[in-house]
Amino acid sequence: MTAKIIDGKVLSKKVMKSLEPRIASLKEKGIIPGLSVIIVGEDPASLSYVTSKGKACERLGIGSETIMLKEDTPQKDLLAIIENLNTNTRVHGILVQLPLPSQIDENTVLEAINSEKDVDGFSPVNMGRLISGQDCFAPATPSGVMEMLARSKINPEGKHAVIIGRSNIVGKPMAALLMQKKKGANATVTLCHSRTKNIPDITKQADILISAIGKPNFVTADMVKPGAVVIDIGINRVDDDTREKGYCIVGDVDFEAVKEVASAITPVPGGVGRMTIAMLMKSTVQAAENTL
Ligand code: GUN
C-alpha cells in the first residue's frame, strides 16, 4: 500500500480562502484584524517562523507588526511591551515566539498576555479552557492537525491516537483536542514521552500516529501499524551539502519507508507547518470578531 499524501499546501490554502470573507466583513465594520509578534533574540528557526507569519498576514490583509528584541532584553522590558499591546485596540492577537532566552521566565510572560488576545493559546487561561472543553484559542499546530484530519475525512472517533512528545506547544494540547467530547474528536489517546518504555510497542497499536519529538527518522516503518494515519509534526534541520543553504528540513518520520505502510501521511515540508500558519491567521480573525 502507498499512503495518500495529506497535502498541507492545498489544505492550508482552503483555510486561508475561508478567512477572506470574514476579513472583508470586519473591514466593512472598520476593523482590520491585527497581529503583533514579539521575538527575542535571533534564533534562525524562530526568525523563519516569524517571517512566514508576517507573509501570511500580508497575503490576507491582516495588519501585522514584528517586534524584534535583543537576546539580552530584561524580562521587565518584555512585560512592559506586552502590557502596551494588551491595551492597544488595534492589536487583536499577541504572540511571543518561543523559546525565550534564559533570563526570561516563559510562564510569567505567557500569563501576562491578555487571554482574549492570546491567539497562540499558550496562556494558562486558554490551556485551562482547552482541557475543560470550553471555547478557547487552542494552539495552532495541534489545531492544524485536527483541521487536516477533518478536511481529509479522517474521523478520530473511537480510534487509538498515539502522540509522541509532551510539549506544552504540541503534545499536551494535541492530546486534549483529540480527546474532546465532540464531533471530529472522541479519540482514545496515549501520549508517549522520553521516559516511556517500549515506544514501538505502543506506536504499533496506533490508528493515528502523531510525532512531535524533533528527531529525524525517529518513526520507522516497523513502528507503524499497516493502514495507520501518520502525522509528522517534526521540523528538523539536517546538514545537506547539495543545498545552497547547507541544510534541508525533514520531519520525525522516515517518510519514504513509512508511506509504504501507512494509509495516509503528512510530508515535511508541505504538511503540518503550512497549516500551523493558517490556523494562527484563523485565530487572529476570530480574536478580531470577538471584539464586535
Ligand atoms: N515556537 C515554535 N512553535 C511556536 C508557536 O506555534 N508559537 C510560538 N509562540 N512559538 C513557537
Image (cartoon, helix red, strand yellow):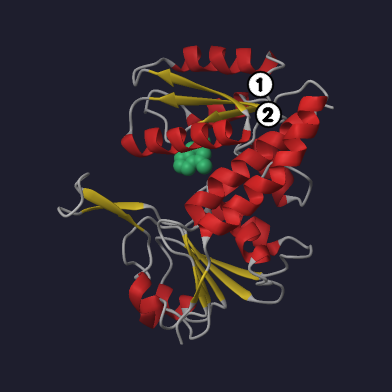
* Label 1 Cα neighbours within 10 Å, binned few <14 / some 14-19 / many ≥20: many
Q: Quadrant of residue 256?
A: bottom left
Residue in view at x 76 percent, y 26 percent: 27
Q: Disc 2 marks which amino acid? A: Lys
Residue drawn at x 46%, y 18% as measured from the top left = 75
Relative placement, left or right, of 69 versus 206 is: left
Q: Amino acid at mark 1?
A: Val
Q: CA distance from mark 1 to mark 2?
A: 8 Å
Residue 137 can be seen in this image: yes
The picture places residue 163, in percent across and down from the top left corner, at 52, 65
Q: Nearer the viewer, mark 1 or mark 2?
A: 1
> Which label was assigned to residue 232?
none
Q: Which residue is mark 2?
A: 117
Answer with mark 1 or mark 2, whichever residue precedes in sequence: 1
Circles 1 and 2: CB distance less than 8 Å? yes
Q: Give x and y (percent) for residue 122.
A: 59, 38
The secondary structure type at the circle numbered 2 is loop
Q: Which residue is mark 1?
A: 91
Residue at 66%, 64% in the rendered image = 151
- Looking at mark 1, is its residue's CB closer than 8 Å to ligand 1? no
Q: Secondary structure at mark 1?
A: loop
Residue 42 % position (x, y): 33, 28
Is 7 situated above or below 80? below
